[in-house]
Amino acid sequence: MSELPYLEPHHLATREMVRAFAQEEVAPVAAAHDADQSFPWANVRKMADLGLLGIPWPEALGGAGLDPIAFMIAIEELAVVCASHAITISAHTTLGTSPIVNFGSDAQRERFVPRLASGKVLGGFGLTEPGAGSDAGGTQTTAVRRGDRYILNGTKRFITHGGVGEVFVVTAVTDPARGTKGISSFILTKETCDLEGAAAVGMGHDAALVPMPGFRAGKKEDKLGWRASDTRELIFEDVEVPLEHRLGEEGMGFKNFMRTLDAGRIGIAALSLGLARGAFEQALAYTAQRRQFGKAIAEFQGVHFQLSDLATQLDAARHLTYHAAWLSQTGRPFGKEAAMAKLFCSELATKATIVAIQLHGGYGYTKDYPVERMFRDAKIGEIGEGTSEMQRIVIARHLLPDLRL
């Protein structure tokens, strides 16, 4: 693995710390949590204690005071051994917390960000709906203004932390006549659906956050991968949301969540990069010790070619991901680069896990080796936070700005 020019001493220290935690605490329990779809409360508490739930936020807001590159490093290192742990910090930080940091008022930041950055409660982002996935502008959830509050009705789907979370940024239509300019965003609070699990580890619930009546979690999704990540519906039934819980100006929700998704795509790129690297490392170790025809199968030229291709593509993926993170960190435009990184890394993760299973032979098709789980975890990277097809459209729009694509 070639070293990156973007990394400073604090990045290397973060990498070593998270890598050690992932190997010592996450790797031994990842398969068990995947098998029974249990949320890893104990390790989430440990990640909170390490500051991993608030890496890029200022210390004044309860964060670790680091930067986006350090955050991507943490996601990558966790994903090497367990994508579910990686998406927990990625979704919580980028989707659940960053909209409040970036678009919230001082009062909103002071109230919610320290709770989220410290891990006292978990956060999420309610955008996707039954009829609004890639077509995010097709939002059907409504928010009707009544005096000093809004009344929200609707349903969101596939929401990370939908059950275990207590603070959510959600989108709703406030002016149907204005299209995407009629979508606004709000901060909603509810009680975690797992009070027992939260109490057992001393995090995940804050009694000072009053749940909003009518706002609740729906059914838990039975997923192919990311099975230790809590994914559910969010349901709004005449939820009264005070005006001070509107996030930003009315009608700015679509524009703001598109900015949020740009940053989130770098997180999915880092997660997919970690998955691909994890699969590659498993394949490298296995082919070095597995013997056939009197020698290690790593000595066969056909295996050389597959490992060499993956190593080359991993280096390309690493540069795409951290270049996008560096652009974001230094205040430069990064929408195209984020889409490129997400597209390349997610498709590489799927490819790398397939190759790793093939190199393991029949053993790779069993749950005795982690490559089977990695294969299932990889596919969602090509779907979540914008499908591969949508990433190609985003890239094309940057390449052809004068065309209305």
Image (cartoon, rainbow, N blue to C red):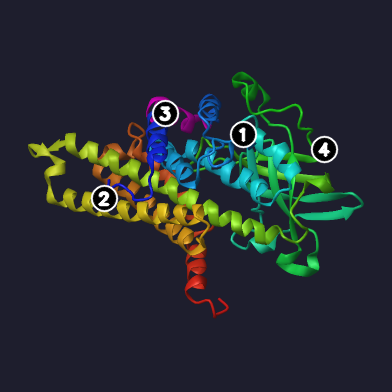
For disc 2, the marked residue is 311
Q: Give the total of numbered labels.
A: 4
What is the quadrant of the N terminus in the image? Answer: top left
Determine whether, in the image, residue 313 is placed left or right of residue 142.
left
For disc 4, the marked residue is 213
Q: Are marks 3 and 2 in contact (CB under 8 Å)?
A: no
Q: Nearer the viewer, residue 248 or 300?
A: 248
Residue sitting at the far top: 200
Stretch in magenta: 23-37
Q: Amino acid at mark 3?
A: Phe
Disc 3 and disc 1: Cα gap in Å?
A: 21 Å
Say whether disc 1 or disc 2 marks the residue closer to the N-terminus: 1
Q: What's the mark number on residue 21?
A: 3
Decide whether residue 393 is among the magenta residues. Answer: no
Determine whether, in the image, residue 171 is placed left or right of residue 230.
right
Return the x and y of residue 234 as percentages of the image width and height: 70, 44
Return the x and y of residue 399 as percentages of the image width and height: 47, 73
Q: Are marks 2 and 4 in contact (CB under 8 Å)?
A: no
Q: Residue at x 26, y 41 (%)?
A: 283
Return the x and y of residue 148 as percentages of the image width and height: 89, 49
Secondary structure under tag 3 reads helix
Q: Nearer the viewer, residue 302 or 258?
A: 258
